[in-house]
Amino acid sequence: MAFDIAAISRMARTARTPAATPSPPSRLVGTTPGCYALLISDDEYHHQAPGISSTGLKQLLRSPAHYQTYLQERGSDSPARRLGRAIHAWVLEPHLFDQKFAVWRAGARRGRAYADFELAHRGKTILGEAEMRAVQGCAHALLNDKTFPLRGFLEGARDGLGQPLVAPAKTEFSIFWTDEATGVQCKVRLDAVRLEDPVIAVDLKSTDDARPEAFTRQLLRLHYDLQAAFYMEGVRRFTGRECPFIFAAVEADRPHGTAFYALSPNSDLMENGRRKVRHALGLKARCDRTGKFPGYGFTQVMEPVMAPWMAFKAAQEDEANLAA
């Protein structure tokens, strides 16, 4: 039987309690008023499931024209995206890694041998040896960092008799709902979330610098605050609870430095993300209503403005050495 996400969406949209599960039963894993969760693949989530994702909202913040281009080109790939997907798979779904990835270990990607390898692994993402070492190094660093028990969070805990004490986190968990204010259908796919008290969500981020100042700049530049706020709205709609959102940051290059950052529900960054979400959803509704997806709309030549934090500041000892 074909998997009809749209049919499940229509059935779950009006569900008031965890109702009888529509076919196929393994995919719909829960409903709350106007909200439902599905166990689906990455491809189904990105290309079949209805709704706008946080990535789409980020593109709308740049301009509706950028959002429209993103919809047309979202299947494009890059080394950074490839590495990020592989780290996610190795950490969150290790049992599926070999179904999604293959490793080429024979040098340059050319010649008949490589063509045969591609053919034999059609549909998989092919990594080089260096990329695979980076994936394993990043995963090892994240899972063994003592700051946050990521391994235990993902795997759960059992007592001496093997009985579960803490349920394992749900990984690659997809939630769908409709925003009442705009009528826009929304969707999120959480890296890892624990739905029981205390509810916690974790998102993995590869970066070139995991230190606080550098990562915070990346967080704002790439709108991770929007992502956190949007994901937390999905979790709140599904569970009825607010919770912290934790970024597990790992540096792609050796020695794969790690850091964990938590955005609490009432933090300034989370509130900043909520404002971005509301603005982007409003843009989406207007574009849907008018059928127009404008670009930047600048009307004059502008002078760049330098914020105080952008100003160059030499260290005092450097100034003293130059004057000597």
Image (tube, helix red, strand yellow):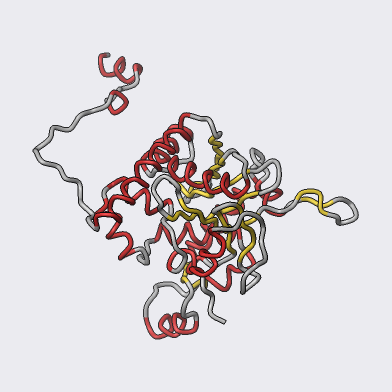
Position of 5 relative to 195 (above/below): below
| Identity of the residue drawn at 47% across and 75% down | 106
Position of 219 relative to 133 (above/below): above
Name the foreground residue: 294 vs 16: 16
Name the foreground residue: 260 vs 256: 260
> Relative to 312, is 278 on the left or the right?
right
Q: Position of residue 309 (x, y in %)?
A: 32, 26
Name the foreground residue: 292 vs 110: 292
Q: Position of residue 280 (x, y in %)?
A: 35, 45
Q: Is residue 249 visible?
A: no
Residue 163 falls in image quadrant: bottom right
Image quadrant in which the N terminus is located: bottom right
Name the foreground residue: 232 vs 320: 232
> Relative to 309, is 129 on the left or the right?
right
> Relative to 95, is 132 on the left or the right?
left
Q: Position of residue 144 (x, y in %)?
A: 65, 47
| Identity of the residue drawn at 51% across and 62% down | 86
Position of 269 relative to 83 (above/below): above
The tally of labels here is: 0
| Identity of the residue drawn at 40% across and 61% down | 79
Q: Is residue 319 visible?
A: yes
Q: Residue furthest right?
A: 161
Image quadrant in which the C terminus is located: top left
Q: Position of residue 226 (x, y in %)?
A: 43, 42
